[in-house]
Image (spheres, rainbow, N blue to C red):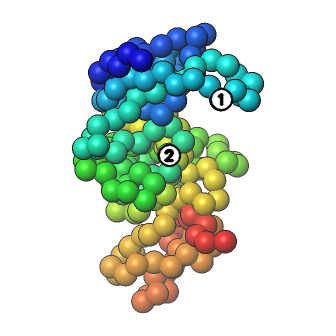
Amino acid sequence: MTTELVTPGDVIGKVSELKAGKGAYVNDTTIYASLTGTRRIVSPLPESLDQRAIVEVTGHKAHALIPEPGSVVIGRVTKVMARMASVDILCVGSKAVYEKFPGIIRQQDVRATEIDKVDMHLSYHAGDIVRAMVLSLGDARAYYLSTAKNELGVVSAESAAGETMVPISWTEMQCPLSGQTEQRKVAKVGS
């Protein structure tokens, strides 16, 4: 087995010959490395319908955790604009990241229904803590994030009085001190 050191963005295979595994992603028909590490080719399971080998990148143990498409992340909203909200990604899954990653929640990715009626300023405020899913690596500046599922959205917000607000519906949170309600795209917590 040949091993080769790769870095994010390196071409590591073609979709016609290989499947992307851990540490790899597909763009068009090319497979790229999403982290720094060693490129490996893994044989498919004998019972697998797709008999292409899997190419994966095994990161170094000390390598920082990075968001990948499909990952659920926790982040802090830093800025809200008319068509998007900027987010600093703080955790991937349940693990904190070593450095903050920039993310963007676009207007069309806030919720699954009535996306044309979404008002970003009624969905998020700067300082809100949100749970979101990574849609893609986005552009060169930020990951594209989505809160378009019931369990995704604002998980913690602070009221004008400085208190942690309590969710009272999927679109509102309330300050326990003043009783004032504020609009948010609230994440459904628990089940």
SS type, badge 2: loop
Question: Residue 71's mark?
Answer: 2
Looking at the rendered structure, the kind of residue marked 1 is Leu
Q: Write down the quadrant of residue 108 in the picture.
A: top right
Please provide percent x and percent y for residue 23: 43, 32
The C terminus is located in which quarter?
bottom right
Q: In this view, does 99 lie above or below 41?
A: below
SS type, badge 1: loop
Question: Residue 117's mark?
Answer: none
Q: Which of marks 1 and 2 is nearer the N terminus?
A: 1
Q: In this view, does 62 lie above or below 127?
A: above
Position of residue 129 in the picture relative to residue 172 (left or right): left
Please provide percent x and percent y for residue 114: 69, 48
- Classify 10 Å Cα crowding around label 1: few (below 14), some (14-19), many (20 and above): few
In this rendered view, identify the residue nearer to me: 82 or 48: 48
Residue at 45%, 54% (x, y): give it.
Answer: 93
Give the spatial CA distance, label 1 vs label 2: 24 Å
Looking at the rendered structure, the kind of residue marked 2 is Ser
Position of residue 96 in the picture relative to residue 157 (left or right): left
In this rendered view, identify the residue nearer to me: 155 or 79: 155
Q: Is residue 59 visible?
A: yes
Residue at 62%, 25% (x, y): give it.
Answer: 44
Residue at 64%, 45% (x, y): give it.
Answer: 115
Q: In this view, does 150 lie above or below 139?
A: below
- Classify 10 Å Cα crowding around label 2: few (below 14), some (14-19), many (20 and above): some
Question: Residue 45's mark?
Answer: 1
Q: Write down the quadrant of residue 19 in the picture.
A: top right
In this rendered view, identify the residue nearer to me: 49 or 29: 49
The N terminus is located in which quarter?
top left
